[in-house]
């Protein structure tokens, strides 16, 4: 079971965010049975609330036998024409995500971007 969970976990993208704009994001810890956990970033403009992002993510992961917990949220400002992403803000429901962790995930996904973060702002 651990090998299958690890395989399912490895197929979960570390980052899924919209290509442009300002939108909410959540930092989610994904777990498989007997497998190590990994943190993923999900951010989309369709989400009115951070909980919408988390629930959709949890549903998708459950289909693959994976569970998850929300570590917090914030906002992303993604400006592809400038190759910039700014991470900031917090989630009223889940609290502030560790923006430093989010930034590292984004840097791995967007190596040619300037990625910044701040605890200020909503």
Image (tube, rainbow, N blue to C red):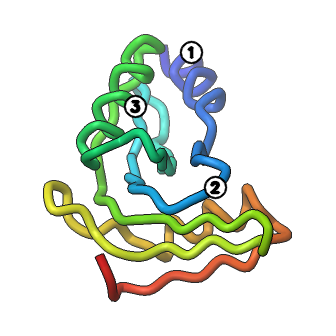
Give the label, 1 or 2, closer to the camera: 2
Q: Which residue occupies the foreground of this view, 33 or 87?
A: 87
The residue tagged 2 is 20
Q: Are marks 1 and 2 in contact (CB under 8 Å)?
A: no
Residue 17 shown left or right of residue 83 in the figure? left
Q: Are marks 2 and 3 in contact (CB under 8 Å)?
A: no
Q: Residue furthest right?
A: 112
**Mark 2 to mark 3: distance in Å?**
20 Å
Q: SS at mark 3?
A: helix
Picture layout, residue 24 above or below residue 60: below
**In the rendered image, which quarter contains the C terminus?**
bottom left
Image quarter of residue 91: bottom left
Q: Which numbered marker is on residue 57?
A: 3
Picture layout, residue 78 above or below residue 66: below
**Mark 3 to mark 1: distance in Å?**
19 Å
In terms of sequence position, does the residue under pointer 1 or pointer 2 come before the other? Answer: 1
Q: Which residue occupies the foreground of this view, 97 or 2?
A: 97
Q: Which numbered marker is on residue 4?
A: 1
Instruction: Sort mark 2 into few (<14), some (14-19) or many (20+) by Cα contacts within 10 Å.
Output: some
Instruction: Sort mark 1 into few (<14), some (14-19) or many (20+) by Cα contacts within 10 Å.
Output: some
In terms of sequence position, does the residue under pointer 2 or pointer 3 come before the other? Answer: 2
**Mark 1 to mark 2: distance in Å?**
35 Å
Q: SS at mark 1?
A: helix
User: Residue 12's spot in the image, x, y percent?
Assistant: 59, 31
Image quarter of residue 31: top left
User: Residue 84's spot in the image, x, y percent?
Assistant: 70, 74
User: Residue 59's spot in the image, x, y percent?
Assistant: 35, 20
Residue 56 shown left or right of residue 18 in the figure? left
């Amino acid at each position: 079971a651990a090998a299958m969970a690890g395989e399912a976990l490895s197929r979960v993208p570390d980052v899924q965010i919209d290509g442009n704009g300002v939108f909410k994001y959540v930092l989610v810890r994904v777990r498989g049975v007997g497998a190590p956990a990994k943190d993923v970033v999900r951010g989309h403009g369709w989400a009115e609330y951070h909980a919408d992002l988390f629930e959709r993510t949890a549903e998708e992961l459950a289909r693959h036998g994976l569970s998850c917990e929300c570590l917090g949220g914030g906002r992303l400002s993604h400006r592809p024409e400038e190759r910039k992403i700014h991470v900031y803000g917090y989630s009223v429901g889940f609290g502030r995500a560790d923006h430093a962790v989010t930034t590292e995930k984004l840097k791995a996904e967007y190596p040619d971007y300037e990625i910044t973060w701040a605890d200020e702002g909503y």
